[in-house]
Amino acid sequence: MRGLAGLAAAAALIGAPAWATDPLRSGADAVRDQALTDGTAYSIVQSISTEVGPRLAGSEAAARARDWAVAKLTDLGFSRVHVEPFPITAWSRGPESASLTAPFPAHLAIIGLGGSVPTPPEGVEGDVALFTTYADLLAAAPGSLTGKIVVVTEGMTRTQDGSGYGMANPLRRSGASEAAKRGAIAYLVRSLATGVSREPHTGAMNYSSAAPRIPAAALSVIDAAWLERLAGLGKPLRINLKLASSTAPATGWTVVGDIPGTEHPEQVILIGGHLDSWDPGTGSIDDGAGIAIAVGAAHLAGAAPHRPKRTLRVALFGAEEMNFTDAAFTAAHAAEAKDIVAIGEIDEGADNVWNAQFPAGTASLPEMRTLAASLAPLKIYVSPQPPRFGGSDIGGLVAAGAPLVDFQQDASRYFDWHHSSEDTLDKIDPAQLNQNVAAWATFLYVLSQTDISLRPHPAPAKP
């Protein structure tokens, strides 16, 4: 009987696919499959959306988010949970409004851009210089817009990889200074958004030292299109804009937690998302989903039967939206850059991952081929191209040599809602959220169970 059993087992192994006897592959598949039904990530994003809500960096809500994050990581069993404070300039939104005063009175749906200076209490009022493209504004001569309120109505292109946002970003980031260089007294830009709504989308702006600082706000997509139609009828437009923003020195907080490696604890795989959010919505897709995916994936990979040999680290960055975290986090961890095995940031919502990008030349490593095979059932392909941008909070460490990885999410819907009051929990599909967790958890498991390097390999010497 024992002989027959042995023959049966041998026959089963002969007939089984090769990966069935590969402990790395079977372990990765198990973590992946568990992630697809695990409720940890959704409970995290539900919790921060409900219990904390909007959390602008430097605000009282940001302090509550800090305490929430420490408690959440501790409850999930992370060790060395700690807070890393850093100085920021907190920007706060006050009462704001805009109205068309000619050719007839009408309310305009606007929202101030992060970092904008305020208007006088009575507002600023001026005739409108409307440009249907940003290029037309840049072509305007110096002094040609003196006393005008500039309105730019160029739309943003919907793309799966989010590249439409990158191309449109100068309209929001640099438009106010470009208008001011030409004499404008205020700047309004069509929201960087792919949806059609009367909810305007905010976001950070930057002032150039070569131009006066003028107040700036975003128009809803619908109102921007309406103003464009009015201007097309040849009607002179006039607008009054009121913004009551303010700034003050404050503190930002990044929260960090580890799952220590059993054999190489000094080697760190670092992933994260940003804890702060804009103030109109509840910060659910931007970036409650990102921190939920990072924490959920590390928790699952760290709890697998084979404990991670390398340390899994989660960082919840404290001031991404106003671009303060990167410099502070880099300064705090620059000495560790040589020990970072891989680094990645999750900040594009909760829809499915479709594309994995790894450092050049590493996708062909045997262990990474195993990873690719485990990712395939999730409908994720491994791109032949290395990642070019991995996140606003980790750029300094990437520049210092930390190997960048990126799991690109489907951004087709993301910019319908991001930075607006529509950024709420109902936009998250739990199944798609879990697909993200499965992708990252599988990656963390494979990388933490091996000793492979994702740093550039020297080219073989020529004979």
Image: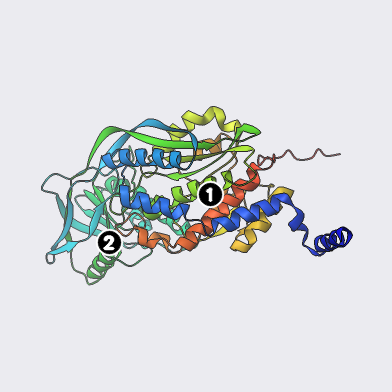
Measured Cα–Cα span from mark 1 to mark 2: 33 Å
* Image position, residue 249 (x, y; %): 28, 31
Q: Nearest the camera: 107 or 331? A: 331
Compared across the picture, whether 37 is left or right of 232 comes to: right
Q: Residue furthest top?
A: 335
The furthest residue to the front: 1
Where residue 259 sits: x, y (%)? 54, 38
Q: Write down the residue under mark 2.
A: 199
Asked which quadrant contains residue 109, the reply is: bottom left
Q: Which mark is residue 165?
A: none
Residue 183 position within the rendered picture, expressed as x and y whole percent measured from the top left: 24, 47
Q: Residue at x 57, y 43 (%)?
A: 302
Q: Amino acid at mark 1?
A: Ala
Q: Residue furthest bottom?
A: 233
Q: Secondary structure at mark 2?
A: loop
Q: Residue at x 28, y 59 (%)?
A: 200
Q: The residue under label 2 is which amino acid type? A: Glu
Task: Find residue 119 and report its horizontal and vertical position in percent.
Answer: 17, 45
Tell me where residue 154 sits by quadrant.
bottom left
Pointers 1 and 2 in contact (C-beta within 8 Å): no
